[in-house]
Image (tube, rainbow, N blue to C red):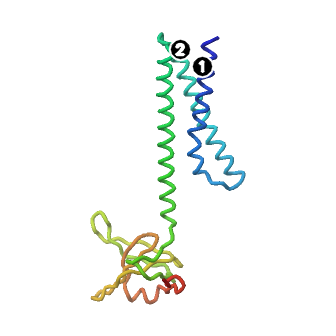
């Protein structure tokens, strides 16, 4: 009976540790009503139940071992807590990276010293960019009505204008730029 009570207590400790491990991850579930609260509850329950099951199985196997001194139990408990904490930290870092990539993809183009003029594209544009890996020319598409920033202009033929959009940075011919872009006057005041 003592062993059963110890295993149940260890499982309860695992559920509490799982609940604590799920709290940092709740930051990535948006607050948007009943649907999102269900996601948060499901994530918290899965971490709590999963950790409780892990601790339950560990307790069952530990009671089979002949050494049941309290220091051995404490060391094993610390190892389990570190495993759960490491898994939670790894999951947190992964979700943080995914969220940062998403936020970077939807970022608003801002003026800078290299790209001082903001423009709006009147039509969809193909922009010539150079690949960072090998320097070979590639094309990317900038969507209609997208905000972009214009940088330096080449004065020697072929005349090109450097342009930065959400999809990347590249070059647009000066002749195409006259017909395809409109200056955003409100955004260009210092």
- Residue 133, label in figure: none
Residue 76, position as x, y percentages in the image: 48, 23
Q: Is residue 49 left or right of residue 116?
A: right
Q: Which residue is drawn at 58% across and 28% down?
A: 53
Few, some or many C-alpha atoms within 10 Å of disc 2 (few <14, some 14-19, many ≥20)?
some
Residue 5, position as x, y percentages in the image: 64, 17
Quadrant that contains the N terminus: top right
Q: Give the residue furthest to the front.
A: 71
Residue carrying label 1? 7
Q: Which of marks 1 and 2 is nearer the N terminus?
A: 1
Residue 123, position as x, y percentages in the image: 50, 82
Q: In this view, does 22 lie to the left or right of 176?
A: right
SS assignment at label 1: helix
Q: In this view, does 2 lie to the left or right of 137?
A: right
Q: Which of the pair 158/34 is nearer the observer?
A: 34
Residue 27 vertical position relative to residue 146 in the rendered view, above or below: above
Number of numbered tags placed on the structure image: 2
Residue carrying label 2? 63
Q: Which of the pair 167/137 is nearer the observer?
A: 167
Q: Residue at x 32, y 67 (%)?
A: 131
Q: Distance between the residues labelled 1 and 2?
A: 9 Å
Q: Which of the pair 143/92 is nearer the observer?
A: 92
Q: Do the residues labelled 1 and 2 touch (CB within 8 Å)?
A: yes
Q: Which residue is drawn at 36% across and 78% down?
A: 171
Residue 85 vertical position relative to residue 178 in the rendered view, above or below: above
Residue 94 vertical position relative to residue 73 in the rendered view, above or below: below
SS assignment at label 2: helix
Few, some or many C-alpha atoms within 10 Å of disc 1 (few <14, some 14-19, many ≥20)?
many
Residue 32, position as x, y percentages in the image: 68, 56
Q: Residue at x 48, y 27 (%)?
A: 78
């Amino acid at each position: 009976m003592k062993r059963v009570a110890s295993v149940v207590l260890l499982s309860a400790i695992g559920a509490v540790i799982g609940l604590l491990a799920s709290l940092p991850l709740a930051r990535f579930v948006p607050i948007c009503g009943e649907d999102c609260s269900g996601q948060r509850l499901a994530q918290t329950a899965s971490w709590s139940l999963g950790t409780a099951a892990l601790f339950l199985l560990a307790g069952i196997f530990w009671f089979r071992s002949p050494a049941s001194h309290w220091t051995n139990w404490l060391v094993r408990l610390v190892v389990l807590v570190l495993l759960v904490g490491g898994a939670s930290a790894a999951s947190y870092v992964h979700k943080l990276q995914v969220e940062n990539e998403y936020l970077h993809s939807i970022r608003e183009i801002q003026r800078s010293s290299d790209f001082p003029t903001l423009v709006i594209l009147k039509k969809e544009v193909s922009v010539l960019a150079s690949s960072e890996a090998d320097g070979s020319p590639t094309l990317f598409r900038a969507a209609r009505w997208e905000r972009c920033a214009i940088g330096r202009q080449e004065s020697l033929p072929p005349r090109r204008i450097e342009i930065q959009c959400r999809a990347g940075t590249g070059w647009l011919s000066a002749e195409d730029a006259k017909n395809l872009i409109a200056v955003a006057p409100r955004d260009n005041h210092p």
